[in-house]
Image (cartoon, rainbow, N blue to C red):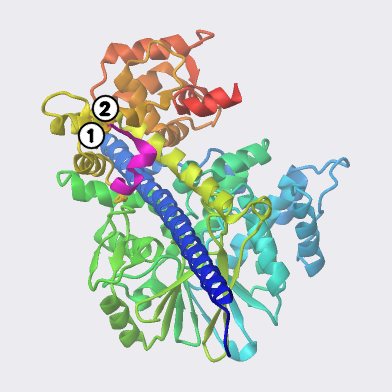
Amino acid sequence: VNCCPCSTKLFFTVLQAAILIQKWYRFTMARLEMRRRYSLSIFQSIEYADEQDQLQVFSTFLFSFYLVPVSEIFTSPSAPQVVDEDLCLKEFEKKIDVPDSYYGPRLSFPLTVEDANALLHAFRNEQLLHARYVLQLLSETRRVLKEMPNITHLSTSYSKDITICGDLHGNLDDLLLIFYKNGLPSEQNRYVFNGDFVDRGKNSMEILIILFAFLLIYPNDLHLNRGNHEDYIMNLRYGFTKEVSKKYKDHWKQILCLLRDVFSWLPLATIIDSKVLILHGGISDTTDLDFLNALERSKVRDHIHVRVILFSFKKFLLIKHPLSHAHKHEVECILDILWSDPRSQNGCTPNKSRGGGCYFGPDVTAKLFERYNLKMLIRSHEFKPEGYEISHDGKVITIFSASNYYEEGSNRGAYIKLTPELTPRFVQYQVSKFTRRQNLRERVGTIESSALKSLREKIYAHRSELTSAFAQYDVNGTGRISVNDWAAAMESVLQLELPWRMLRSQLAQMNPDGEVDFMSCFYDLKMDQPIKEAQPALAETLCRYRKDLEIIFNIIDKDHSGLISLEEFSQTWRLFTSHLGIDVQDDSIDKLVLSIDYNKDGHIDFNEFLEAFHVVHRLEKKATS
């Protein structure tokens, strides 16, 4: 067929245009994916760094008080007597009145499916369950959990599939979406929830109530494993304690005290058909399932503070260890299964990113599988952008069920449908409230902006150390260094293992000669520091350790009034700065403390005090003013 030259030329012009558009599209998508990935890396690196900071702070704090019994330092919320073992449903009914003005669910025990449906309906409409029913529910849950073994054994012969869910972290919408897509728990629709039900999200209490209600209705069909966030100290740090105190102003102490006991009775693992091991974190080269099944799990009530004791013992060898050898071994076994992460390299090494548990390689997995004739390990504990990840040649699966974990649109959640043939089928989802109205570029921009904001706050909190590190490379005092030197200084101080050269354009300015103006890292940030008495080193320290100081002050503040005495504040602060090697003058903290005792009653509101020391983004402040 003869084609005219004009047609041929037009064809090639169109083809070239199509190729250019395709190249542009691929390039744009690749850049967006790169931005999304480094944003998620920032979030995860900061999350793990915060866990390390917490461990450092608590090892220091415990070391300072090593002559005081651990039980006196790390106490549960006060008023433990109100949730005595012998308190029964009727006694809660007598002690706590439910007013006629309460329109939420009214539970009667034993619970029915109708009660569970009433709870789901109420929580969809943002109603609270009355404290009396919460305490009754927790009391009944503890009774049921105490009868359960450390390791639950299930069989697929009784049902078609078993659904396994990972971390929910207080995201009620994810749980409701799972039930909508997959159906409610029942004898024909069995579930395993693999820990970390609480913290970070705003509806941890509602998630617990729903899961515990279905546990009471279907104790053989809904199963719960303990996660590393089912822990009193973690709850102080990551939001669950504050959530409960706000929602249940009159009875939150009793609720938290009873929850602490409930958490200690949660099973540690689940095994399906003697082939599939499900636990929250991972394993180590010393994991012994027989030993794990035999230990008294309720004795390890708050594994974080015991983790601190172990850390302190390794760091300060002169301290007499407060744990017996047997109990130390029990604690280490539980820490390993709650805190460990898989890695592609062989071997078993300490998990330095988290400060607890270990990194376990394919050889460690293979060794455990051979010993116990296992086929698959399903674990959670780690954020995954797609909601799941397969590693160790298909033997290890990570399942993460909290979508939008770091930011709206940051990740999908997922759950596993395990067939009778023990084949995993993955179901992904993402709760979308706002992102449906955004295109891909806008969604990535939102995630990137939030990640960079968190990173800039981390940078500012280490301003003094970074300035010193930059100065070592700036031998002529020009205020400028090479990109390589700037990246090396950032990593040496922050130790976040981030692609600093790639991030440079977002964090610091470069001059025409290709050198970095290193002080520009701090240009768009300032300390929201209304108190002139705070010297720079003191303000920076308060900014950096604000969350950890809040936990320590909460421990000292046993009646949880939010107030501590000036003497307690000063003594704690001096110990804190001394053992962390922070150079702050004594008279500086004294002046600061006296200046914020506004009514001169000898006490300060430490929450209000700490809130005064946080990083403000100048551009944001201008935009909102």
Q: Which residue has dot 1 on it? A: 513
Q: Which mark is residue 464?
A: 2
In the displayed structure, would residue 148 be above or below residue 350? below
SS at badge 2: helix
Instruction: Kindly identify the residue that appears in the image at 29 percent across and 59 percent down.
Output: 351
Nearest the eye: 120 or 79: 120
**Quadrant location, the N terminus:** bottom right
Q: Position of residue 432 (x, y in %)?
A: 66, 56
How dense is the environment of label 2, judged by Cα within 10 Å: few (below 14), some, or many (20 and up)? some
Q: What type is the residue that disc 2 sits on?
A: Ser
* In magenta stretch: residue 508: yes
Q: Quadrant of residue 173?
A: bottom right
Picture coordinates of residue 334, whole percent (x, y): 37, 63
Residue 217 visible in the picture: no
Type of amino acid at the residue the image marks with label 1: Asp
- Residue 358, image quadrant: bottom left
Alpha carbons under labels 2 and 1: distance apart: 26 Å
Residue 319 lies, with reference to residue 224, above or below; the image says above
User: How crowded is the residue under tag 1: few (<14 C-alpha within 10 Å), some, or many (20+)?
Assistant: few
What's drawn in magenta, residue-wise? Answer: 500-511
> What residue lies at 56% left-to-right and 59% top-to-bottom?
402
In terms of secondary structure, what is the magenta stretch mainly? helix
